[in-house]
C-alpha cells in the first residue's frame, strides 16, 4: 500500500539546464560580506525540520540491506519533508554511510604514488569546467600541503533528468576525491590531518569563488576516512534515482543515517540538505546568534584550533544552524580522549538542574559533568533530535525538552534502527526491543565493538572520564542569594529626580513597579497596544522600547514556563573562561549567579569578590551634560567609544569583572543608556576575541521592567542590578507598611519569572544560552546604532541615530532638572491609558463615540466624522498612517457605481478570535449573527462553541483550534467552514491563554469540558506543533476531520514571518492570517503587549512578498488582522497583499465597549467582557450595529477603489506601487525610517505569480485509507446499524478514522452512534494521529503499533492498540516494557476510551477532558493540564506528571515508591487507592477491561494478585476537583439528591 501511494506522487517536470541567476546568489553575497554583517541564515532565510533516523549493524558486517532499509525508511518519511512550488524539487534528502570502497575504487584511475586510499571527499563543484578545475586545484593543494596524496578524482554518476525545475537550476557538478596516506599513519593521526585538510580547503574554495565569481557554490559535503554523504535538493524517492551509486548492489555499509528536510523556504540550496558531516538534525537552534558570537569570542582560547586565516571559520553566520552545530560537534569530538557522544552531551545537555533522578547512585557523576561543562559552554538550545556518526560511533540524542519524536528498535540479528516514526523498517518478526528517546536522552552504538548503549549506560560512562566533582569543588564559586537589607538610602526628592532623569513615568512606578513589588507578578493589561512605536512617537522613549522580542511560531515551539519550569534555569556562570577543548580545574574557575536580576547585596558581593584573586573594574557610563547639549549624538558616540576603550583596557590589565555603572548621574552628568553601553562593550570585546576573559555586570537606574532585563541579558550582560528600582520599592513599601525587604524579594521574583517567560516564548530553556543571543528585532534604529551596539540584529526599517537618542535622553534629564524657575516634571505620557495631551492612541474617546454613533444610526455622515478621527490618529500611531494612497495618475478613476458592491466586499471580513469566556455569551452570539447575516465569518476563539448553536444563526463559521483544545470534537470540526490553527496571538505571541476561575461558568465549563469555577491555563502552542512538519500533520488531521473546510493558520508579525508563511503554504494550509503584534482583546502582561510582535504592515508585506517570490501566493488566502478600524486601513492592507480582513476591537466598540481595559477582571461595566450575570444584563449591543459598521467600512473601501481605478476588489490586492510615503505625516523620528521594504512591489520578485489565491491545495484526500474504506461503512452509518471491516495500515496512513468520524458527525451530530457500531480491525504500523477525533460509535483496534498523536482529540470513540503477534512470546510477555504508541497521545481527548498494551511517550493525556485511558507506562509530562476523565498507568511515569492537572483522576502503579518524586504536586494530592473501596472497584474494572481488550500480560498479573497489588496504586486527585466534588456532595445532601459525589461531578 505504501508503495502504491508513493508511486502516485506528482510526476517530475522535465529537467532543464541550469539557468542564469537573476540576482546575486545568497552564498556569494554572504561570502563577500564581513562576518559581523552577514545576515543570519536561520533567521531570515531558512528554518527547517525533518524526518531522520539511522540503521546500524552491531555485528560490524557491511550489508546491502542496511542501505536499502535506509532508502526505504527515507521514502516512508516523505510526508515529513517539503518541496518547492514545482512539486518536484525537494527541500533536501540525503544519506550518510560508511565509504563503499569496493564501489569507489572500481574503475578509478588511481595514482599509485599517492599512498593507500584512506579517505574520501564528496565535493559539490561549480557547474562550469573552468571554475571546477580551479576548485580541484585548490583542494589538491590543501591535501598535499598536509602530507597526503591525491589518489584520484571520481565523477559521481548522476541522472539529472529526475530533478525538479528549481533543483536543476542550481545543481552542482558532483565529484569525489580519494585521498592517499602513508601505510604507517594511524587512524587518530589520519583523522586529524583529514580534518585539517578540509578546513583549509574550505577557506581556499570560498576565497577562490569570491575572487573569480564562480557560477556555483563550492561545498564539501563530506571529507572523512570513514563516512560519505550523498544528498541533494530532491524528494526521498528520487535520491537513489539521482545518485546511481545508491542503486548498485556493490554499495554496502555497516550503518546509514538518512534525512528528509522540510524547509520554510523554497529557494534551493544544495549545501543545506542533510546529513551534515557528523549530524543529521531535526529541529532548530533558537540561541544560534548567541552561540555563534560566543564561539567566535572563544576562538583565541581554542588552543588546538587557533584562529588561522588559512582555515575556514569554526562557525559562520551564513551557515545554517545545523551546519554550525555540526561544526562545533565535530571540533569537540576530534579532541584526544573525546568522542561524539561526549561532544553532544556538552553542546546539548539534558535538563540536569532540577532532575532528581541524577542524584541516584546509578547516575553518579553525570550532574557534575554537566555543571562543569556549563561553566564554559552554553547549551545550543532548541528543539532537536540529533542523529550522529563519525564512522566510529553512531547514535541519537534529544534536546532537554524532548520536542521531537525518536523511536528505536533492536533485532535479534544485530540491527539497531532509530527513526522519527515507527514502521519504516521491515523487521517486525525479529524485534527484541522497542523504545524511545525521552527528553535529554541518548542511545549509541560503538561501531568498532558493536556494543549498544542505552542512555543510563552511556551517560555515567562518559561522566567517569574525569573527576568533575573535585574540579568543581576546588575551583568553582557561587554568588549565593542573600536577604535584602530593605532599607532605602535615597531621599524621596533624590529618588524622584533619579527615576525622572532615567525616563520613568508615573505609570511605570504606580502600576508596573508597584504591582511587581506587591504581587510578585507583572501588571496584566488587555485590549492591546494602541500607542505608537517608539520610532513613530513624538514623545521621548527609553532605548528598550526600540527593541521587540522575537517568539517561536511554527518552526519551533515555545516552552511552558509555568508547568514545565523544571527544564528551565536562570543560573549563569560569569567571569573568564578557560580553553573549551581542555578538561582541567582551570576551566571551572568561574562564579555562578542564581539569576540575572541581582540584589544590591549580590552586586556588592560581586564587586568585592576575592574569588580566584579576581578584581572588578567599575566603568562610569555617565558623561558631561554640557557636552551632550553642545555636541548631541557625537557626544553620545564618543562616550560609548570611551566606555569600550576602558573595558578593553580593563581586560588587558587582568581585571576579571567589568561593572558598567551609571550611579554618577547628576544634574551635570547624563548617563549613556545602559543597553547602548552593554551592547557596545559586549560587541567590542567579541571583535577583540576577549569577551570570554571577563564577566560583564550592569549597575543601572534605567532597568525597571522585565523587558529591560531581557534586552540587557540578551545583548551580553551577565547580571543586572536595578538600584533605583530597589530604592523606589523600598520607599513605597515603607509607606504602605510592608517590610521593604519583602517587597524587593517579590519584585526580584517577578523579574526572574518574567525573564523565564520571555525566554520561553522563543523556546529557550536557560539564561546562559539566552545571554548574548540577541533574540530581538530593532524597530526604528539606524545602522550606526545597530552596528555599534547590537551587531547582527535585524533593523529592517533603519531609523534613528545617536542624535535622536541623545535628544530623548536630554528631554528626560531636563524633566528632572528643568530650566531655572520650573519645578521638576513627573513624567506621565499616558503610554498605557489615553491621556489628554499625552502619547497618541488609536482608540481615543472621541473616535469611540463617533464609531458607536455611526454603528447605531448607520449614518454616512457620522461614519465620515469617525473616519476623519481615525485617519488623524493613524498618522500618529501606525506605519500605514504614513502612506499616501494613489494620487499617482497610474489609472483613471472609475464611476463608483461600477465598483464591486459592498455586499461582496463584506464577505471578505471576519471578526477576531474572541473566545466564549473572555467575552460574554451575548457578545459572542451577536458577533456570529452579524457575520452570518453579512456572509462574512465569525470566529469561536479557543473556547469552543455550544453545539446548540451549530444549527442556527449563532454558528461561528470559523472554529479555532488552539493549544487548550477546548471543546474540539469531531462534531465541532464538522460544523465549520474554516478551521483555524492558532499558532500565536497578537497580545501575547509565544504564550498560552488564561481564564480565571470566576469566569468559568456552568456553560463555559460544559463547552470547554472543564470543571466550573476552576481556572484554566492554555499551554503555549507546542504539544502537537513542535515544528513545521508537525504543523503539516495538524493541517492534514483537520482536513481529514472536515474535508470541505479550508484550513487556516494564524501567525503574528515578526522578523522571518515571511519564510514561516512560505512553510505554512508548503504544509498545505489554505489560508494564512498575519496578525499585528499590537494585540486585541486578549489579556497579557505588559511585557508581552508592549514588547513582543511587530506591526501588521511589516509582517503582511513580508509574508506576501515571500509567498510571491516562492510561487506560493496563488495557493493561499492571506488575511490581515491588526487593529483595522476603517476603510482606509482595509485598502492599505489590500494593497500590501491581503484579500481578507479581520476586525476585533472595532466590532466590540460598535457593540458598546468603552475601553475600560478590565476584560480580565470580570468587571466590564457594559456586559461585553464579563461572565457576571448582573453585568451581562447591561449589554445593549445588537448584531445590526456590527453589520452597519462593517458595511460603512466596505463603502469607504469602494470609494478608494473608484479613485484608484479598480472595479474588482482582487484587482488591487498586492498593488503596493499605489502606496507612497506622505512627507507631511512624518516627524523627526519617523522621517528616519526606510519604508521601502514594506513598499517593495511583490510582482517584481516573481512576475509569473498571481497576487492572490487562484488554486486549491492538493490535500490528497482520495489517497487516505479511511476515505477508501468509507464506502464499506457508509450504509451502516446512514442506517444507524453496525458493521465490521478490517485492513492493513502503514505509517503513511495518517489521521486514520477522522474522515469516517466526520461522516458520523454529519449524520448523527454530537450524540454519534451506539458503542461498537462501526468496528475496524487494523494490522500494521499506524501513521501519526491514529483515531484523530474518533467519533462515538467507532471502535478501532490495531494489532501492531502507532506513532505520535494517537487518539488525539478522541471524541467518544474507542481505541485499542496491542503488539503484533508476530513478535513472539518472549516479546509479548514483556510488552509492558516496550513502546506501543508515540508522544502526545490522547492530547485534547474529550470522551471515549483507549487501551494501549505497552508504553506511551511524552505528554500522555495532555488536556484530556473526558476520555478513559489505560496504558502500561508513560514519559514526561503525563496528564498535564488534564481537566477530566480517567488515566490508568500500569507502569512507570516520567517526570512532571500531573503538572497543571485540574480535573479527572489518575491511577498510577507504583511498586517501587518512586512516583511521588516524579509527580508535580502543585495542583494535586496523592493517596493510596486501597484507602477507598470505591476507588479499588473502579480501578479494577479498568484493568479487567484492559486485559480483555488487549490480552495484556501485565494486567493479568496485576489482577491475579489484586489484594497485594491494589495497595501499590497511587490515586492522583486535583485539589480543585476534590473541592468541587465535596461542594456538590454537600449540596446534594442538603437537597436530598441521590448518587455519589463522583457521579455528581461526572
Image (cartoon, rainbow, N blue to C red):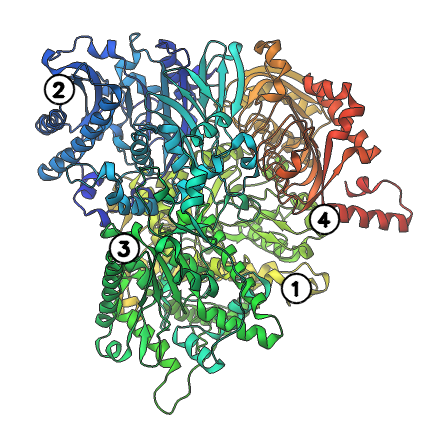
Question: Which residue corresponds to mark 3?
Answer: 683
Question: Which residue corresponds to mark 1?
Answer: 1179
1516 vs 1223, nearest the viewer = 1516
Res. 149 mark? 2
Return the disc, 4 or 1, that comes first in the chain's sequence.
Answer: 1
Q: Could you say whether the residue bearing mark 4 is in a helix, strand or loop?
A: helix
Decide if residue 1327 is in sight here. no
Q: Are marks 2 and 4 in contact (CB under 8 Å)?
A: no
Q: Is residue 522 above or below residue 450?
A: below
Question: Which residue corresponds to mark 4?
Answer: 1520
CA–CA distance between discs 3 and 1? 56 Å
937 vs 67, nearest the viewer = 67
Return the disc, 2 or 1, that comes first in the chain's sequence.
Answer: 2
Crowding at label 3, few (<14), some or many (≥20) Cα neighbours within 10 Å?
many
Return the disc, 3 or 4, that comes first in the chain's sequence.
Answer: 3
CA–CA distance between discs 3 and 4? 51 Å
Residue displayed at 9% across by 39% down: 211
Residue placed furthest toward the bottom: 821
| Residue 920 in the image, given as x and y percentages of width and height | 65, 57
Q: Is residue 1013 above or below residue 110?
A: below
Residue displayed at 26% across by 70% down: 636
Res. 321 mark? none
Instruction: Please state which of the two labelled residues, at mark 3 or mark 1, is closer to the viewer.
Output: 3
Q: In the rendered image, which quarter is residue 1236 located in? A: bottom left
Q: Are marks 3 and 1 in contact (CB under 8 Å)?
A: no
Q: Could you say whether the residue bearing mark 1 is in a helix, strand or loop?
A: loop
Crowding at label 1, few (<14), some or many (≥20) Cα neighbours within 10 Å?
many
Q: In this image, 1271 relative to 861: left or right?
A: right
Return the disc, 2 or 4, that comes first in the chain's sequence.
Answer: 2
| Residue 1383 in the image, given as x and y percentages of width and height | 54, 31
State which quarter of the image contains the C terminus: top right
Amino acid at each position: 500500500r505504501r508503495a502504491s501511494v508513493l508511486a502516485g506522487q506528482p510526476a517530475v517536470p522535465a529537467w532543464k539546464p541550469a539557468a542564469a541567476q537573476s540576482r546575486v546568489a545568497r552564498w556569494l553575497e554572504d561570502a563577500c560580506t564581513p562576518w559581523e554583517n552577514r545576515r543570519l541564515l536561520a533567521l531570515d532565510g531558512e528554518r527547517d525540520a525533518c524526518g531522520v533516523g539511522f540503521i546500524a549493524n552491531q555485528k560490524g558486517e557491511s550489508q546491502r540491506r542496511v542501505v536499502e532499509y535506509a532508502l526505504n525508511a527515507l521514502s516512508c518519511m516523505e510526508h515529513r519533508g517539503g518541496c518547492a512550488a514545482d512539486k518536484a524539487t525537494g527541500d533536501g534528502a540525503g544519506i550518510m554511510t560508511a565509504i563503499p570502497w569496493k564501489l569507489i575504487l572500481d574503475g578509478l584511475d588511481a595514482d599509485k604514488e599517492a599512498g593507500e586510499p584512506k579517505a574520501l571527499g564528496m565535493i559539490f563543484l561549480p557547474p562550469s569546467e573552468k571554475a571546477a578545475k580551479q576548485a580541484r586545484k585548490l583542494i589538491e593543494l590543501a591535501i598535499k600541503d598536509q602530507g597526503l596524496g591525491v589518489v584520484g578524482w571520481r565523477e559521481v554518476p548522476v541522472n539529472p533528468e529526475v530533478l525538479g525545475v528549481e533543483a536543476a537550476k542550481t545543481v552542482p557538478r558532483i565529484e569525489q576525491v580519494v585521498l592517499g596516506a602513508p601505510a604507517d599513519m594511524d587512524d587518530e593521526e589520519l583523522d586529524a590531518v583529514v580534518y585539517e585538510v578540509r578546513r583549509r580547503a574550505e577557506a581556499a574554495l570560498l576565497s577562490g569563488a569570491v575572487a573569480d565569481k564562480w557560477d556555483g557554490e563550492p561545498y564539501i559535503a563530506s571529507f572523512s576516512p570513514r563516512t560519505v554523504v550523498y544528498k541533494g535538493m530532491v524528494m526521498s524517492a528520487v535520491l537513489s534515482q539521482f545518485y546511481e551509486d545508491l542503486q548498485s548492489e556493490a554499495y554496502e555499509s555497516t550503518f546509514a543515517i538518512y534525512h528528509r528536510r522540510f524547509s520554510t523556504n523554497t529557494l534551493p540550496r544544495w549545501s543545506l540538505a542533510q546529513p551534515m558531516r557528523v549530524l543529521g538534525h531535526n529541529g532548530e537552534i533558537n540561541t544560534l546568534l548567541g552561540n555563534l558570537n560566543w564561539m567566535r569570542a572563544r576562538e583565541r582560547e581554542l588552543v588546538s584550533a587557533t584562529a588561522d586565516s588559512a582555515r575556514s571559520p569554526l562557525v559562520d553566520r551564513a551557515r545554517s544552524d545545523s551546519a554550525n552545530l555540526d561544526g562545533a560537534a565535530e571540533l569537540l569530538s576530534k579532541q584526544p580522549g573525546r568522542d561524539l557522544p561526549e561532544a553532544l552531551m556538552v553542546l546539548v545537555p539534558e535538563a540536569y538542574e532540577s532532575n532528581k533522578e541524577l542524584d541516584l547512585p546509578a547516575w553518579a557523576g553525570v550532574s557534575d559533568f554537566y555543571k562543569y561543562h556549563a561553566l564554559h559552554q552554553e547549551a545550543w538550545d532548541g528543539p532537536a533530535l540529533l542523529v550522529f556518526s563519525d564512522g566510529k560511533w553512531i547514535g541519537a540524542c534529544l534536546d532537554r525538552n524532548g520536542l521531537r519524536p525518536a523511536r528505536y528498535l533492536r533485532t535479534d540479528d544485530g540491527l539497531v534502527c532509530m527513526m522519527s516514526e515507527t514502521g519504516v523498517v521491515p523487521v517486525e518478526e525479529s524485534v527484541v526491543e522497542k523504545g524511545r528517546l525521552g527528553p535529554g536522552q541518548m542511545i549509541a552504538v560503538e561501531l568498532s565493538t558493536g556494543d549498544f548503549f542505552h542512555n543510563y549506560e552511556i551517560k555515567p560512562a562518559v561522566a567517569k572520564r574525569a573527576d568533575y566533582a573535585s574540579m568543581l569543588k576546588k575551583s568553582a564559586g557561587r554568588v549565593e542569594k542573600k536577604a535584602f537589607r530593605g532599607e532605602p538610602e535615597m531621599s524621596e526628592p533624590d529618588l524622584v529626580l533619579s527615576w525622572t532623569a532615567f525616563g520613568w513615568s508615573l505609570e511605570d512606578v504606580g502600576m508596573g513597579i508597584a504591582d511587581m513589588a506587591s504581587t510578585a507578578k507583572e501588571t496584566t493589561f488587555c485590549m492591546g497596544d494602541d500607542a505608537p512605536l517608539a520610532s513613530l512617537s513624538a514623545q521621548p522613549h527609553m532605548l528598550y522600547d526600540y527593541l521587540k522580542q522575537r517568539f517561536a511560531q511554527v518552526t519551533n515551539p515555545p516552552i511552558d514556563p509555568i508547568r514545565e519550569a523544571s527544564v528551565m534555569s536562570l543560573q549563569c556562570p560569569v567571569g573568564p573562561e578557560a580553553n573549551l577543548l581542555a578538561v582541567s580545574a582551570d576551566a571551572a574557575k568561574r562564579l555562578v549567579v542564581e539569576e540575572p536580576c541581582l540584589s544590591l547585596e549580590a552586586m556588592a558581593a560581586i564587586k568585592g569578590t576575592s574569588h580566584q584573586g579576581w578584581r572588578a573594574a567599575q566603568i562610569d557610563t555617565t558623561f558631561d551634560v554640557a557636552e551632550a547639549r553642545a555636541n548631541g549624538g557625537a557626544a553620545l558616540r564618543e562616550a560609548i567609544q570611551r566606555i569600550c576603550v576602558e573595558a578593553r583596557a580593563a581586560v588587558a590589565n587582568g581585571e576579571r569583572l567589568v561593572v558598567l555603572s551609571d550611579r554618577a548621574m547628576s544634574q551635570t552628568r547624563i548617563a549613556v543608556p545602559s543597553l547602548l553601553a552593554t551592547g557596545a562593550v559586549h560587541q567590542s570585546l567579541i571583535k577583540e576575541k576577549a569577551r570570554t576573559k571577563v564577566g560583564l555586570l550592569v549597575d543601572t537606574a534605567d532597568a525597571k521592567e522585565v523587558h529591560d532585563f531581557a534586552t540587557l541579558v540578551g545583548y551580553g550582560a551577565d547580571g543586572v542590578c536595578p538600584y533605583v528600582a530597589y530604592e523606589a520599592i523600598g520607599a513605597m513599601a515603607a509607606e504602605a507598611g510592608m517590610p521593604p525587604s519583602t517587597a524587593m524579594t517579590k519584585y526580584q521574583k517577578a523579574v526572574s519569572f518574567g525573564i523565564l517567560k520571555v525566554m520561553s516564548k522563543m523556546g529557550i530553556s536557560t539564561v546562559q544560552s539566552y545571554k548574548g543571543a540577541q533574540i530581538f528585532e530593532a524597530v526604528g534604529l539606524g545602522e550606526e546604532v545597530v552596528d555599534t551596539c547590537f551587531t547582527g540584529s535585524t533593523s529592517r526599517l533603519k531609523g534613528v541615530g545617536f542624535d535622536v537618542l541623545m535628544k530623548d535622553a536630554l528631554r528626560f534629564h531636563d524633566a528632572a532638572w528643568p530650566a531655572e524657575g520650573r519645578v521638576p516634571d513627573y513624567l506621565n505620557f499616558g503610554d498605557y491609558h489615553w491621556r489628554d495631551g499625552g502619547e497618541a492612541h488609536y482608540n481615543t474617546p472621541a473616535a469611540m463615540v463617533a464609531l458607536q454613533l455611526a454603528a447605531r444610526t448607520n449614518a454616512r455622515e457620522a461614519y465620515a466624522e469617525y473616519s476623519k478621527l481615525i485617519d488623524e490618529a493613524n498618522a500618529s500611531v501606525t506605519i500605514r498612517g504614513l502612506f499616501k494612497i494613489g494620487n499617482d495618475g497610474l489609472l483613471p478613476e472609475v464611476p463608483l457605481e461600477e465598483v464591486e458592491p459592498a455586499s461582496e466586499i463584506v464577505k471578505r471580513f471576519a471578526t477576531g478570535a474572541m473566545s466564549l469566556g473572555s467575552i460574554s455569551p451575548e457578545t459572542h452570539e451577536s458577533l456570529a449573527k452579524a457575520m452570518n447575516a453579512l456572509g462574512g465569518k465569525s470566529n469561536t476563539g479557543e473556547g469552543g462553541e455550544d453545539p446548540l448553536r451549530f444549527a442556527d444563526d449563532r454558528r461561528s463559521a470559523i472554529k479555532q483550534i488552539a493549544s487548550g483544545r477546548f471543546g474540539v470534537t469531531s462534531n465541532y470540526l464538522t460544523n465549520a467552514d474554516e478551521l483555524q490553527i492558532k499558532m500565536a496571538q497578537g497580545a501575547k505571541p509565544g504564550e498560552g491563554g488564561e481564564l480565571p476561575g470566576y469566569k468559568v461558568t456552568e456553560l463555559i465549563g460544559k463547552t470547554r469540558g472543564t470543571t466550573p469555577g476552576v481556572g484554566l491555563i492554555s499551554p503555549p502552542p507546542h504539544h502537537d506543533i513542535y515544528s513545521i512538519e508537525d504543523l503539516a500533520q495538524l493541517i492534514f488531521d483537520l482536513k481529514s476531520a472536515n474535508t470541505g473546510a479550508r484550513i487556516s493558520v494564524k501567525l503574528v508579525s515578526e522578523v522571518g514571518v515571511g519564510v514561516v508563511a512560505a512553510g505554512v503554504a508548503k504544509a498545505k494550509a489554505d489560508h494564512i492570517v498575519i496578525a499585528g503584534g499590537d494585540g486585541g482583546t486578549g489579556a497579557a502582561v505588559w511585557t508581552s503587549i508592549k514588547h513582543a510582535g511587530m506591526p501588521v504592515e511589516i509582517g503582511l508585506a513580508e509574508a506576501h512578498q515571500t509567498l510571491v517570490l516562492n510561487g506560493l501566493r496563488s495557493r493561499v488566502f492571506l488575511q490581515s488582522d491588526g487593529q483595522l478600524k476603517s476603510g482606509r486601513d482595509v485598502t492599505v492592507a489590500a494593497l500590501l497583499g491581503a484579500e481578507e480582513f479581520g476586525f476585533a476591537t472595532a466590532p466590540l466598540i460598535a457593540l458598546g465597549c468603552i475601553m475600560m481595559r478590565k476584560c480580565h477582571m470580570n468587571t466590564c461595566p457594559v456586559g461585553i467582557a464579563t461572565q457576571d450575570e448582573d453585568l451581562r444584563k447591561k449589554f445593549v449591543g445588537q448584531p445590526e450595529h456590527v453589520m452597519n459598521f462593517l458595511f460603512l467600512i466596505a463603502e469607504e473601501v469602494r470609494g478608494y477603489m473608484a479613485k484608484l481605478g479598480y472595479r474588482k476588489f482582487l484587482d488591487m490586492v498586492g498593488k503596493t506601487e499605489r502606496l507612497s510615503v506622505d512627507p507631511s505625516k512624518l516627524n523627526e523620528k519617523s522621517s528616519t525610517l526606510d519604508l521601502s521594504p514594506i513598499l517593495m512591489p511583490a510582482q517584481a520578485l516573481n512576475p509569473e505569480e498571481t497576487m492572490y489565491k487562484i488554486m486549491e491545495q492538493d490535500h490528497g484526500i482520495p489517497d487516505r485509507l479511511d476515505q477508501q474504506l468509507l464506502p464499506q461503512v457508509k450504509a451502516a452509518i446512514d442506517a444507524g446499524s453496525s458493521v465490521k471491516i478490517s485492513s492493513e495500515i502503514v505509517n503513511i496512513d495518517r489521521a486514520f478514522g477522522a474522515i469516517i468520524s466526520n461522516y458520523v458527525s454529519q449524520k448523527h451530530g454530537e450524540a454519534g452512534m451506539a458503542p461498537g457500531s462501526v468496528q475496524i480491525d487494523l494490522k500494521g504500523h499506524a501513521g501519526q494521529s491514529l483515531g484523530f477525533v474518533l467519533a462515538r460509535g467507532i471502535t478501532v483496534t490495531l494489532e501492531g503499533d502507532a506513532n505520535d498523536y494517537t487518539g488525539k482529540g478522541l471524541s467518544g470513540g474507542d481505541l485499542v492498540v496491542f503488539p503484533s503477534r508476530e513478535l513472539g512470546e518472549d516479546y509479548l510477555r514483556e510488552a509492558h516494557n516496550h513502546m506501543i504508541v508515540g508522544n502526545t497521545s490522547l492530547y485534547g481527548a474529550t470522551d471515549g476510551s483507549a487501551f494501549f498494551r505497552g508504553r506511551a511517550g511524552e505528554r500522555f493525556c495532555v488536556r484530556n477532558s473526558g476520555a478513559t485511558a489505560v496504558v502500561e507506562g508513560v514519559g514526561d509530562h503525563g496528564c498535564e493540564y488534564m481537566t477530566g476523565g480517567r488515566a490508568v498507568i500500569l507502569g512507570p511515569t516520567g517526570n512532571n506528571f500531573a503538572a497543571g492537572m485540574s480535573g479527572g483522576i489518575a491511577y498510577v502503579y507504583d511498586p517501587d515508591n518512586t512516583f511521588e518524586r516524579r509527580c508535580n504536586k502543585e495542583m494535586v494530592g496523592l493517596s493510596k487507592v486501597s484507602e477507598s473501596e470505591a476507588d479499588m472497584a473502579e480501578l479494577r474494572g479498568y484493568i479487567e477491561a484492559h486485559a480483555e481488550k488487549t490480552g495484556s500480560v501485565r494486567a493479568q498479573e496485576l489482577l491475579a494478585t489484586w489484594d497485594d497489588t491494589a495497595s501499590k496504586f497511587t490515586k492522583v486527585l486535583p485539589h480543585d476537583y476534590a473541592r468541587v466534588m465535596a461542594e456538590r456532595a454537600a449540596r446534594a445532601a442538603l437537597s436530598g439528591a441521590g448518587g455519589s459525589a463522583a457521579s455528581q461531578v461526572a
